[in-house]
Structure formats: C-alpha cells, structure tokens
Image (cartoon, helix red, strand yellow):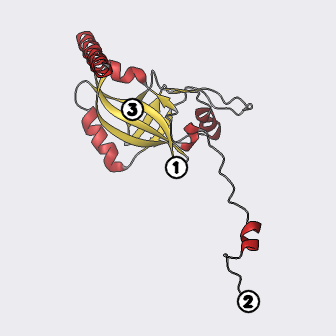
Amino acid sequence: MPRSLSNPTQAASTKPAPKEKDRDPVAAGRRDASFNRSAAYNYFLTDRFEAGVALRGTEVKSIREGKANLKDAYGLLKDGECFLLNAHIGPFSHGNAMNHDALRTRKLLLHGTEIRKLDALVRQKGFTLIPVRLYFKNGRVKCELAVAKGKQEWDKRETERKREADSETRAAIARSQRR
C-alpha cells in the first residue's frame, strides 16, 4: 500500500534538504578575481571581448586566493593566436617545486572570428589590447579584453574634471533631498 506524504508521522521523519555551503565570492563568480583600475585611467576603452585563459592548476588556485594583478599586462596577437603578457599571478601558497612562474606568457582562448576582428581593430594606429578584469564563469577563469587607445595627459585631466563634477552634482542632489 503506497504511503502518502500527508501522514504526519512520515512528514516528521523526513529530513530537510541540507543547506549549501557558502562558496568564496570569487570562485562563485559574484566578484572579480582581479580588476585593472589603471586601464580606464590611462586608455579610452572601446570594444570588449571575453576570452578563456589557458592556465596551470596552481595558477587557478592563486587566482582564487586573490593573487592576480593586471596592472602592467597587455594582449598580443601573433600568428593567429592571442596571448596575455606581463599578467602577474603570484605563486600558490601550498605549491611545491613545480609551482608556476609568476609572469609567464599565457594563451588566450578566442574563436577565429574574434581573433580576426581583434586583429583588424589593433592594426589601426594607436590601438592595443588591454586586459580589464579576470573573473570566474562556470568554474573557468575568463579574461575581459578591451581594445584601447592611449590617453594624453590633458585627456586624463579632463576625465578627472568630469568625475569631480559628477560627484559634486550627486552630493548636491543628496543634500537637497535631505531637506
């Protein structure tokens, strides 16, 4: 005879589903593993592309620990392939003698059509590839690349003036709403 769940004795004996443990926000993809703050200050960022990164196991673990730095990094297109240069990923804390080199060149994984688009954009005078951020997506490390053109000193001052004017405007609006 089949039992029904409406039986109070059976309902009391069923266990509630176990609560999932909270994962690290970086590993879960809710927070960037590394963000290149100087990119928006030093460059005009135009088109953005998402690329996978070919990494070793200790590199992935170091990125999860927050040991990645993209400040001086840049992208390079060579022979129909894309590479990430000067990206610093610190050594893994529990690594051994087989730990990775911190500044090694890493291959970026892109589709052929994306590489051809990037090649056409970068061939224009003054444009380069700059990594903007590293993050996890479905357990894999992704790199957001931006096609960038360098800013002159006066461009940087103008950007700073706009930022200050916007913050003053927001502060004035907030003051007027408090009254």
Do tag 1 and tag 3 residues touch (Cβ < 8 Å)?
A: no
Q: Residues within 10 Å of mark 3 (few under 14, many from 20)?
A: some
Label 2 sits on what residue type?
Met
Task: Indicate left or right for 62 with 53 as reference.
Answer: right
Label 2 residue SS: loop
Closest to the observer, 76 or 133: 133
Q: Residues within 10 Å of mark 1 (few under 14, many from 20)?
A: few
Label 3 sits on what residue type?
Leu
Do tag 2 and tag 3 residues touch (Cβ < 8 Å)?
A: no
- Of the two numbered discs 2 and 3 on the same chain, state the one appearing first in sequence: 2
Label 1 sits on what residue type?
Asn
Taking the spot 44% from the left edge, 32% from the top edge, the residue there is 133
Closest to the observer, 17 or 47: 17
Q: Residue 138, labelled with which disc?
A: 1
Q: Which residue lies furthest to the bottom in this view?
A: 1
Taking the spot 39% from the left edge, 32% from the top edge, the residue there is 76
Taking the spot 74% from the left edge, 32% from the top edge, the residue there is 96
Task: Indicate left or right for 131 with 10 as reference.
Answer: left
Where is residue 135 shown, x and y percent of the image?
Answer: 49, 38
**Can I make out residue 176 in this image?**
yes
Q: Residue 76, labelled with which disc?
A: 3
Where is residue 33 shown, x and y percent of the image?
Answer: 52, 33
Name the residue tied to disc 2: 1
Depth check, mark 1 against mark 3: the one in front is 1
Taking the spot 31% from the left edge, 17% from the top edge, the residue there is 175
Q: How far apart are marks 1 and 3 (CA)?
A: 26 Å
Q: Residues within 10 Å of mark 2 (few under 14, many from 20)?
A: few
Where is residue 164 shown, x and y percent of the image?
Answer: 29, 13
- Of the two numbered discs 1 and 3 on the same chain, state the one appearing first in sequence: 3
Where is residue 100 shown, x and y percent of the image?
Answer: 63, 32
Q: Is residue 173 above or below residue 8?
A: above
